[in-house]
Image: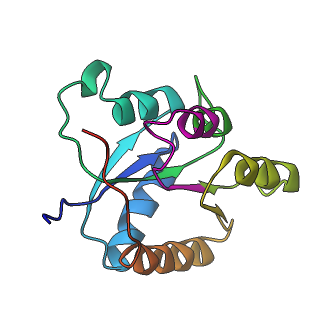
């Protein structure tokens, strides 16, 4: 059985948050490719290999998904991913500043695997991301359907 490299799809519209996430996942020893998209529609295009991502190689994915994004928000993106049999098994980690219990409950109902609230304080945010990076080293991910 061949092992394909895991690609981390980061759906995050805030440039500062995206850079902090990349930096601190690296501090958590994540060496995987991180592909950043800025909204839910672009995330769906990547996952579905549509639009500008039509030629992307099929690789195992894990998605880090923000809620508050333009065009298509994270909750709707999650719903569309989890209701499509072709993408339903892709692990999705909600990584957002939104700590509203209704949003947390809704995301779990829709099938998110983990919900992480971004701490507001810089040091706590960095520490949380480093721990996430360590966690991601041990996660088993299903392969995408060819």
Asked whether 83 or 7 is in front, the reply is 83
Where in the figure is residue 48, as x and y percent of width and height?
A: 36, 30
Residue 67 placement, left or right of 62: right
- Res 50 seen here: yes
Q: Quadrant of residue 2?
A: bottom left
The quadrant of the rendering that contains the N terminus is bottom left
Where in the figure is residue 13, as x and y percent of width and height?
A: 51, 39
Asked whether 129 or 108 is in front, the reply is 108
Which residue is found at the position 45% from the left and 40% from the top? 87
Q: Quadrant of residue 141?
A: bottom left
Which residue is found at the position 52% from the left and 74% from the top? 126
| Residue 80 forms part of the magenta stretch | yes
The quadrant of the rendering that contains the C terminus is top left
- Res 117 seen here: no
Where in the figure is residue 110, as x and y percent of width and height?
A: 69, 45
Residue segment shown in magenta: 78-94
Where in the figure is residue 41, as x and y percent of width and height?
A: 49, 26
Asked whether 90 or 100 is in front, the reply is 90
Q: Is residue 60 above or below residue 68?
A: below
| Residue 8 forms part of the magenta stretch | no
Please tell me how many numbered marks the rendered image carries: 0
Q: Is residue 38 above or below residue 60?
A: above
Asked whether 18 or 47 is in front, the reply is 47
């Amino acid at each position: 059985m061949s092992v394909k490299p895991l690609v981390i799809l980061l759906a995050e519209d805030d440039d500062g948050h995206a850079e902090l996430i990349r930096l601190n996942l690296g501090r958590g020893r994540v060496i995987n490719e991180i592909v950043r998209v800025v909204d839910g529609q672009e995330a769906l295009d990547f996952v579905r290999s549509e639009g500008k991502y039509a030629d992307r190689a099929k690789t195992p994915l894990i998605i880090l998904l923000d809620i508050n994004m333009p065009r298509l928000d994270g909750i709707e993106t999650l719903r569309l991913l989890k209701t499509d049999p072709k993408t339903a098994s892709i692990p999705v980690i909600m990584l957002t500043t939104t700590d509203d219990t209704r949003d947390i409950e809704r995301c779990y109902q829709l099938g998110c695997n983990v919900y992480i609230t971004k701490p507001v304080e810089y040091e706590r945010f960095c520490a949380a991301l480093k721990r996430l990076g360590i966690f991601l080293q041990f996660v088993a991910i299903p392969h995408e359907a060819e």
